[in-house]
Image (spheres, rainbow, N blue to C red):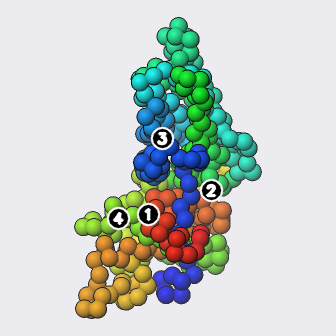
Amino acid sequence: SSAEEWSRAAKVSQMPGVLLSQPAPSNEVLARTRSNFRALLLAPQGPLYEDSRIRLDLTGVTPASRGSSARPGLLFELVVVNVGSNAIQEVQLAPLEPSRTHACELILEPQPLDPSMHRQGGSLWRGQSVRFAGRLDVFGPFEATPPVELSFLLPDGMASRIRLRLPLPLTCLMAAAGVPPEPRIITDLWSSPDFAHTEVAFSCAVSTDLLGPGAPFTVWRCLELSGVFRVLPGLDDNPRGALLASVYPQRQGTPQEVLLRVELGGSSGPGGTPYGVSGTSLPYAETSICRVAVRSASHLVNRAVAQVALEVLCDPAAAAAAAKGGGGHW
């Protein structure tokens, strides 16, 4: 992309919060929750939140329907585990209101308790768990699901409340096409006025764990989101860029294509490659800024996909530093 296109991309200087409780239990818990959230966007099974008393796991994320005429949705399970030394009581997990928006509705239902917990007065002892079946009904493209609140009573009767965003993005409903699309079709779509008009683009500092000897392929692999997108080799003229494709299900009609382009390293130099004073291309560790652009027939879908790309790519520490320096917001 040209220097003008890079300048037009929104510069990310603030990451959306994951742990919404105020104040946060600790910086360590805050950082771990952010890391877990990112990992669950890439592979939706594992821990989301954990402190010295309790852990919340996400598992079993599957599309509720793949039918061409059925409303799309997600099924999942949330598991609350006591990891502390003392028993806790009255464990509850519920969506924060409003649990229904114009684009989706979040439903959580507690599952039957283990008989041994009934004998213990409903107390949750170390190693025991409570399960909640979840369903997300989707009415249209959404950027975020309603947050949830996990609450329980401590042995001294004090209530503890933890508010969280769930890693259930729109991309959980998407999938790479079974047959790779023809290159000409993809390039025509990318250049089409309808796709260009709805583009959502941003630039950010890439997380350091994605840079190094494996870059830029580690960045491309991250954006594949475990098979949601497919990298299309040879379609980007930038040697440090890639074009990826996926499809978004429609309630009626054929799924619509969603295209994502990522470029690493800035706009200066041939093909977008930045160069140092010696005239040689800089290593990836020194060119950590990337530009991401998402195009499809729907601006709302583009915003939702760009949000996921931001969450998995961006370095939160760099974004916080940029925010202190007065950078722009996406």
Residue 166 horizontal side relative to residue 197, left or right: left
The answer for how far apart the CA atoms under marks 1 and 2 are is 23 Å
Q: Which mark, residue 143?
A: 2
The answer for how far apart the CA atoms under marks 1 and 3 are is 20 Å
Contact between marks 1 and 3 (CB within 8 A): the answer is no
Q: Amino acid at mark 4?
A: Thr
Residue at position x 56%, y 42% from top?
63
Residue 188: name its quadrant: bottom right
Q: Position of residue 162 (x, y in %)?
A: 57, 39
Name the residue tied to disc 3: 49
Q: Residues within 10 Å of mark 4 (few under 14, many from 20)?
A: some
Residue at position x 45%, y 58% from top?
312
Point out the tag, 2 or 3, that comes first from the N-terminus.
Answer: 3
Contact between marks 1 and 2 (CB within 8 A): the answer is no
Residue 197: name its quadrant: bottom right
Q: Amino acid at mark 3?
A: Tyr
Point out the tag, 2 or 4, that comes first from the N-terminus.
Answer: 2
Name the residue tied to disc 1: 317
Callout 2: SS:
loop
| Residue 217 higher or lower than 36, as above or below | below
Residue 114 horizontal side relative to residue 99, left or right: left
